[in-house]
Image (cartoon, rainbow, N blue to C red):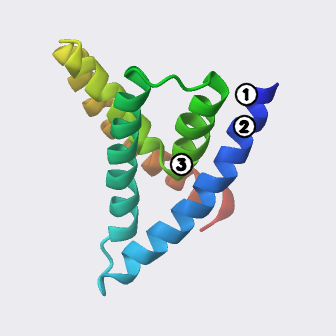
Amino acid sequence: MMKLVMIALGGGVGAVMRYGVSGWGQRLTTGTFPLGTLVVNVSGCLVIGLLGALFAGPHLVREEYRVAVLVGVLGSFTTFSTFGAESFSLLNDGQVRSALVNILVSNAFGLAAVWFGYRLGERWFGA
């Protein structure tokens, strides 16, 4: 039960961080390119990589704190960081084919799902 509470608290922190960092990043550009989202995704990947190395090293971190940060904060801040970490883990373990499949399928299916959901929404809601 404590893990779930810690994840929920971390999730709130991550959502607020995403809002702030994304807004800051977007204000750096005058165009329509989603720079704020890019800043969130790349910074989340950097942080999950750093913390992954820290938690794999000699520093003991209680399980509920580890999941609060990795699942709660970073999961709410950006799921892209988890995608990056899992793809890296596959590559690091020599599973290049699985990593490439994960990268290609996640991107292709993700974009297709957005397209399908939008078209479905247009049909249902008349947008």
Which residue, given by chain and number where applicable, does mark 2 sit on? 6
Which residue, given by chain and number where applicable, does mark 1 sit on? 3
Left or right, 104 with respect to 39, comes to: left
Compared with 45, 101 (above or below) is above
Residue 59 horizontal/vertical position (percent): 45, 25
- Label 3 vs label 1, nearer the camera: 1
Residue 105 horizontal/vertical position (percent): 31, 29
Task: Give the mark nearest the N terminus, 3 or 1.
Answer: 1
Left or right, 93 with respect to 116, comes to: left
**Residue reaching furthest to the right:** 1
Q: How far apart are the two marked residues, 3 and 2, measured between alpha carbons? A: 32 Å
Q: Are marks 2 and 1 in contact (CB under 8 Å)?
A: yes
Which residue, given by chain and number where applicable, does mark 3 sit on? 117
| Quadrant holding the C terminus | bottom right
Instruction: Pick the residue in front: 77 or 64.
Output: 64
Q: Residue at horizontal 61%, vertical 57%?
A: 15
- Kindly state the secondary structure of the residue where label 3 is placed: helix
- Kindly state the secondary structure of the residue where label 2 is placed: helix
Residue 37 horizontal/vertical position (percent): 40, 62
Is residue 109 at least partly visible in the picture?
no
**For the residue carrying disc 3, how many other residues have a C-alpha within 10 Å: few (<14), some (14-19), or many (20+)?**
few
**For the residue carrying disc 1, how many other residues have a C-alpha within 10 Å: few (<14), some (14-19), or many (20+)?**
some
Q: Amino acid at mark 1?
A: Lys
Task: Give the mark nearest the N terminus, 3 or 2.
Answer: 2
Q: Amino acid at mark 3?
A: Gly
**For the residue carrying disc 2, how many other residues have a C-alpha within 10 Å: few (<14), some (14-19), or many (20+)?**
many
Compared with 3, 15 (above or below) is below
Q: Residue at horizontal 55%, vertical 61%?
A: 17
Q: How far apart are the two marked residues, 3 and 1, measured between alpha carbons? A: 33 Å
